[in-house]
Image (cartoon, helix red, strand yellow):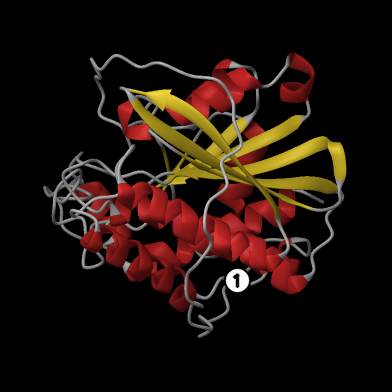
Amino acid sequence: MKLLLSGRALTAGAVAVATLVTGGSAAGAATAPAHPTASATAAAAPDIPIANVKAHLSQLQSIATANGGNRAHGRAGYQASLTYVKAKLDAAGFTTRVQQFTASGRTGYNLIADWPGGDASQVVMAGSHLDSVTSGPGINDNGSGSSAVLETALAVARSGYQPTKHLRFAWWGAEELGLVGSRYYVNSLGSAERAKISGYLNFDMIGSPNPGYFVYDDDPTIEKTFKDYFAGLGISTEIETEGDGRSDHAPFKNAGVPVGGLFSGADYRKTSAQAAKWGGTAGQPFDRCYHSSCDTTANINDTALDRNSDAIAYAVWELSQ
């Protein structure tokens, strides 16, 4: 998630398709316990194995460690992260493309993955930013969202899911410089193509170590979908306000696309009331390592990551019927 204020000069270049070398190892296959569901439709959504999501996080951590401790825009760690995600999607049968742009004098990349089939005039998108800040590996911000979206996409392929609507997944570059990649993508679409997107779901920080359970209150249908899921778990949610306008849903929202998403908290402090209903430590940040070098694989709450990953799959299945 980007900082509230950004004074950096941002520029965008021409669209190009970049060919990247694919690679990466298979994730683990352990299965998390089944969770309650709120409707018969939701029962069709698979449980997302937390071990698989954490295996992706471990890969992103290894990439950062091998590339100066970060996965930031324009750096080798970002390109290696994108290569890893793309390889997984290509092997699973997605149609992928890499969109190129320029920001702060460096080349950036978005990764777009389409699942074949479904009504192309009704597109359900799920996305997350893949870049970190330069000061750390960015495992919660936003390896957590990126890995959960990746594993949801792979679950679509494993299950052979054939939804009524068309499914598209995205990993954005240069979010930390001011939502550059997602804004570039939205601006690259004509009005007719934007109108085909029936919903964009954003996931930026979903495994915070002192977590909250926040739901975007933008599109009512998407908001209700997430609230229904958490209600089925007996978890009360709150409206997301800390990151409003600070993540990649904002360009979509500004273009008139219905948006929604989940968030587990950044540098705001958990209140006593929130600690009473969610656990954790009152008076401490949701993520004390936000935008810091300690945002490593040790900076993840497994329970929050598991619940939010399953909620992503729930919403993707529910909204694409």
**Residue 128: x %, y % from top left:** 48, 44
At 47% from the left edge and 61% from the top edge, which residue is drawn? 84
Which amino acid type corresponds to the residue marked 1 in the rendered image? Pro
Q: Badge 1 local density, few (<14 within 10 Å), some, or many (20+)?
A: some
- Relative height, residue 288 to residue 299 (above, below): above
Residue 209 lies, in percent from the top left, at 24, 60
In this rendered view, identify the residue nearer to me: 37 or 152: 152
Q: Is residue 168 left or right of residue 101?
A: right
Q: Could you say which is closer to the camera, residue 35 or residue 262?
A: 262
At x 19%, y 50%, the residue is 136
Question: What residue is rendered at 29% in x and 64% in y?
Answer: 61
- In the foreground, 317 or 59: 59
Q: Quadrant of residue 176?
A: top left
Left or right of 177, for residue 255 = right
Regarding residue 260, the answer to whether it shows in the image is: yes
Above or below 83: residue 187: above
Q: Which residue is mark 1?
A: 36
Quarter holding residue 257: top right
Helix, strand, or loop for circle 1? Answer: loop
Residue 144: image quadrant is bottom left
User: Is residue 75 placed above or below 143 in the rendered structure?
Assistant: above
Q: Residue at x 57, y 47 (%)?
A: 19
